[in-house]
Image (cartoon, helix red, strand yellow):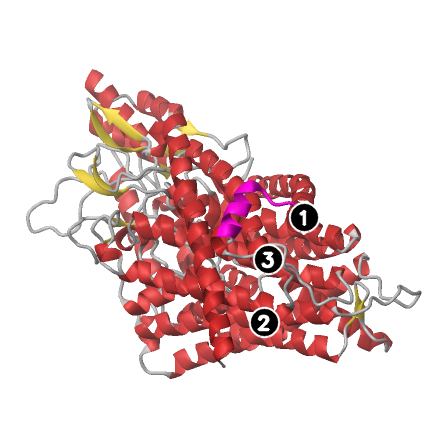
Amino acid sequence: MGPVTAGVLQLLALIGALALVHLPAGAYMARVYSSPRHLRVEKWLYRGIGADPDAQMTWPAYLRAVLAFSAVGVLLLYLLQRLQGVLPGSLGFSSVDPAQSFNTAVSFVTNTNWQSYYGEQTMGHVVQTAGLAVQNFVSAAVGMAVAVALVRGFARSRTGELGNFWADLVRGTLRILVPVAALAAVVLVACGAIQNFSGIHEVGQFMGGSQQWNGGAVASQEAIKELGTNGGGYFNANSAHPFENPTPFSNLLEIFLILVIPFSLTRTFGLMVGNVRQGYAILSTMATIWVGFVALMMWTEFAHHGPALQAAGAAMEGKEVRFGVGGSSLFAVSTTLTSTGAVDSFHSSFTGLGGGIAMLGMMLGEIAPGGTGSGLYGMLIMAVIAVFIAGLMVGRTPEYLGKKIGGREMKLAACYLLVTPTLVLVCTAASMALPTPPHSMLNSGAHGFSEILYAFTSAANNNGSAFAGLNADTDWFNTMTGLAMLLGRFLPMVFVLALAGSLARQQPVPVTAGTLRTEKPLFAGLLVGAILIITGLTYFPALALGPLAEGLA
Amino acid sequence: MNTSVTNTARLLGAGLRALLVLTLVTGVVYPLVVTGIAQALFPGRANGSEIRADGRVVGSSLIGQPYDLPPAKGQQAPRPDLKWFQGRPANGLGANSVNTRYHLILSGATNLAADSKALLQQVRDAKAAVVRDNSVPGYTVEPSDVPADAVTSSGSGLDPDISPAYAALQTHRVAAENRLPLARVRQLVEDHTTGRTLGFLGEPRVNVLELNTALKDLAAKG
């Protein structure tokens, strides 16, 4: 069997596993967010928080709780890093400097996990497990909570109530993320991922002498890093490091973990709005784009254009032997089409077009299938826009799931859509125009521009992967990517929750012969087209200067 | 005004308490429970899959390491010890720059672009070295025989594996250097070749540390 066939079979195996699991997983998540009952441990937690989990929140109240929880998260994670030097269990590592602490705190709270530090030499046990890994859980749970609030906006009528943020947060963490992550972590250890607290210790070498190694709670962090579409590696090499991702099986498992919640949430959505076929339409839109991107990526990586790769004979620079080109391409597309940003191979050394595909995946807004929660709400915003475009074509007031898409709804959806492109393009342009930021580039020419474009695309879309040659540990990049991450995460959430509030208040309109059937393949096709055209028009000039110029040279 | 300040403070207080209780669950209980299970069920793997030979630890089966000669005087670049099978280039590895009382290896890739002149030079140099080192009397390596993994740096810089093609290419040299029959070295490589998991996952590979450990045994037995 050749590597191409093996790559395609891995893709098919992944599709099979996801198809099998998404039905029960989606139904389970729908029950988690709809059940009136609280577990005993949850009641203790609510008492600790001092919140009534049954009190319904309007959209401004829900938003304020999201923002308060996240603000506290940034502050605490910042302090933890600043105080690392005096905390026990930190391996004697010194405190992290202010700009980098700010950047890292924001990065993990916004589910981005952009890293301007080297994990193995910077973060001790306490910051890794009690700081960074905690945000891996809760930032994912926040994303899911906001998505569920939007779904409730569609499902409910003539009410301002969107649910209770504290209940959604606690349930998402306790009932979904923790059990799956624990199971996955044990499987990863069985493959060879490490899980210990042995700190930095000496290990002998074959040729004599010894080297110093980091021990750590790696498998437990790796599991939630993928499941919560976070992506911040314990080690600098991220999921390319053999202790994070030891075998071809662990590689496929990690890709599965990245994709399972975002794809399954379409089922949750279908069940909660009372029409599973609406969920299928969203699912097929996501799956079409994801499979298309995987095919393109495999094609360009197996073709290995580019002088250095041609000289080598295959696109193996920055890739591990055990994963090969197929497993690496599959991982690269899955991580950039979700908000993960973990890498099992280094995108900067991909072919010019391969790097462009990774970037375009993020530019789509990470909605195919997108991050935990953020993928679903991002895709539903695109569906609102597609419905509006269809409405203009036939001259009818657009509706989606029985809710009228009027002026207010469209303004909110349009604002959502404008946030990240504005951040990406303005920050990239400023970095290129100023005298010092370009000094951070490792490569020159078109690829150097791509490094900066990739950095801000990754930050504003809360992805976190990088063309890692860029030296991002400067005050400029720490501050600007930090701001891009903050605004790119929370401004869209404002618009999503406002939209949810405005939808929930509406009285549903009855379905008539003239209603656009949004559960049909025709609509899924329209949605794919709208996504590609809108993203293409927004980013084409920037892509032409970077990856296209490199790929077509 | 006062009420909005109080409300904000109350909300931030709830946020703080929520974060603290969830830290207890996900940042303390979760990692400790997973560590407990991992150490009970898979202690060897949870602690780094160490390999022992001659009564001492010689490394991890998961982490690639250099097989170089001790540096000669006045020489900067390490020279490979041709007795042993060589792993992949690791031009992306770094040394730690903070907390420098430790000597940590920083995993990583070169991040050089496909059209980078520096990368092209690295690949050409590596290929020339592979051809030079592995051509022995009676066996000449052609540049077109050199597989890609032999001339490119891995993502982690710690890739423990090489392709079966690169291992096969090294057998002539290794047999000559160790004065072993070629057929036995070839057999050794074959015994240490791992196929695709379940026939389709990943790529076929040879673990260099395990191969060299077995080679050492074979050479000692003569």
In primary-sequence order, the first of circles 1 and 2 is 1
Q: Chain of mark 1?
A: A
Q: Are the residues flagged by discs 3 and 2 in contact, CB closer than 8 Å?
A: no
Q: Is residue A198 visible?
A: yes
Magenta stretch in the rendered image: A36-47
Front-lying residue, A535 or B163: A535
Residue located at (76% from left, 65% from top) = A526
- Specify whether disc 3 shares its chain with disc 2: yes
Mark 1 to mark 3 CA distance (whole Å) = 16 Å
Q: Name the outermost residue toward the right.
A: A513
Residue at label 3?
A145
Residue at label 2?
A494
Q: Which three-letter amino acid code belongs to the residue tagged 3?
A: Ala
Q: Which three-letter amino acid code belongs to the residue tagged 1?
A: Pro
Q: Which three-letter amino acid code belongs to the residue tagged 2?
A: Val
Say if the magenta span includes residue A38.
yes
Q: Is the magenta region chiefly helix, strand or loop?
A: helix
In the picture provided, is A351 more to the left or to the right than A509?
left
Residue at label 1?
A36
Mark 1 vs mark 2, foreground winner is: 1
> Residue A121: image x %, image y %?
26, 53
Q: Secondary structure at mark 1?
A: loop
Q: Chain of mark 2?
A: A
